[in-house]
Amino acid sequence: MTQLINARAGRVTPEMEAVAAIEKVSVEEIMQGVAEGTIVIPKNKRRKKIRLGAIGKGLRVKVNALIGTSTDWDDPEMEFRKIRAAEAAGCDSFMDLSTGGDIDGMRKKTLAHASVPVGCVPIYQAGIEAIDRRGSVVAMTPEDIFKVLEKQAADGIDFMAVHSALNFEILECLQRNGRVTDIVSRGGSFLTGWMLHNQKENPLYEQFDRVLEILRKYDVVLSVGDAIRPGSIADSLDGSQMKGLIVAGELVVRALDAGVQVMVEGPGHVPLDHVEATMKLQKSLCHNVPYYILGTLATDVAAGYDHIASAIGGAFAGTVGANFLCYVTPAEHLGLPTEDDVRTGVLTTRLAAHAADLANGNRAAWERDLEIARARVRCDVEKQIELAIDPQTARSLLDSNDGEHQCAACGKDCSAQVAARFFGIA
């Protein structure tokens, strides 16, 4: 039984009870959201104790971090340090995007180390193994893909980005209309090369029922991979992206009918004036399932500061419909992230998510901001540090002032504190 099947039957699971307590909402609200498909609970049947985090309508916007080895950077210990750094910074989940070294070993150790849900992208491993064994990704077979998909699900992966929303009709649109950045999704590029070389339909689209059968068996949340997302501001909301979103919506219906929890991945590079339209289109075309966005980056010129460009776009996106933000680090587009980059990426994205939660009227978010505002008036520095998104940095800035709290603008004569004395607050 999946969470979705249980919810539709009116059965409350321990996972529903747990996330209801975490989100401070009724278990009936969680069960109804899961039953309708507007909420997902990523937890593979084979995972044991993890910190659960539901994603979807009416819940806190969640933050995902990325880790994984590659052919250029095969250092599992470094990735485990990144896991610790990201969890300490407050991420809600990980995706293991390993494309080099011992991919199976890395995934199993990630599942053992991480205390939160873990996702992956099966086409990455299938493509890399085809290159290693047969010399090219185009030599990959459909059975290679499904073998990896089954193996990763059986290992305990909680959610899986599966690039099923890509077919020849979408590729023909892309070839006909062109783009500045064509395809920036690695999974999308693997499959595009395979399809065009072999002149065969995408197996993950053509055999979608088989995908669903595997995911239902382990209750893995399907994340419909965005193989055709815009990789530049110029490509936002073009015909190819729209066709991909329409296909994703069709697959969502099939997943829900099969009892498989599902969310949809999205852009990408999106100018601020496109964000609301993008979110509303996804919700409309994809039947209000959770939207997992990879950014969104509000500009292309932020090299070295892409985490900030992403936070700007992500905060707006979270306000108008996005439910799950994938972090972006300062190293985006430039290189592989360090532990410090990972920490910065998580904290910056958490800030964006919190801003969206405030705009959405999340009670816990409002209470936190109210509490820190009152602490400032009381000059309660310790409470301010405790409630900050990044207590470590807040503490270091206080320490740099010899431990004496002074308002940056007013010094010792802080206007809020002076007024508080007259109003009888302080």
Image (cartoon, rainbow, N blue to C red):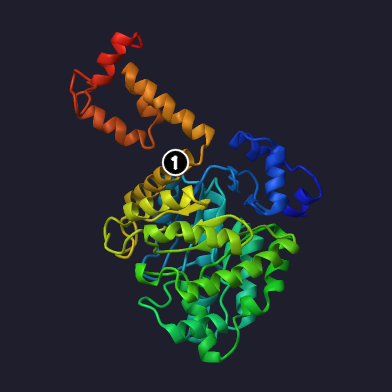
Residue at the spot x=72%, y=44% of the render? 31
In the image, residue 227 lies at what x, y percent?
50, 72
The quadrant where residue 122 appears: bottom right
Q: Residue at x 60, y 76 (%)?
A: 145
Please indicate, yes or no, whether residue 169 appears anywhere in the rendered image. Answer: yes
**Compared to 372, does 168 lie above or below?**
below
Is residue 109 in sight in this rendering?
no
| Image quadrant where one finds the N terminus | bottom right
Q: In which quarter of the image is residue 233?
A: bottom left
Q: Which of 71 and 117 is in front in this view?
A: 117
Say what secondary structure mark 1 lies in. Answer: helix
Return the residue nearer the eye: 291 or 121.
291
Q: Where is residue 30 in the image (x, y as percent from the top left)?
A: 68, 43
Q: Is residue 94 left or right of residue 30?
A: left
Which image quadrant: the C terminus?
top left
| In-image side of 168 versus 2 (left or right) | left
- Which of the 4 image quarters holds residue 245? bottom right
Q: What residue type is labelled 1?
A: His
Quickly name the residue at label 1.
354
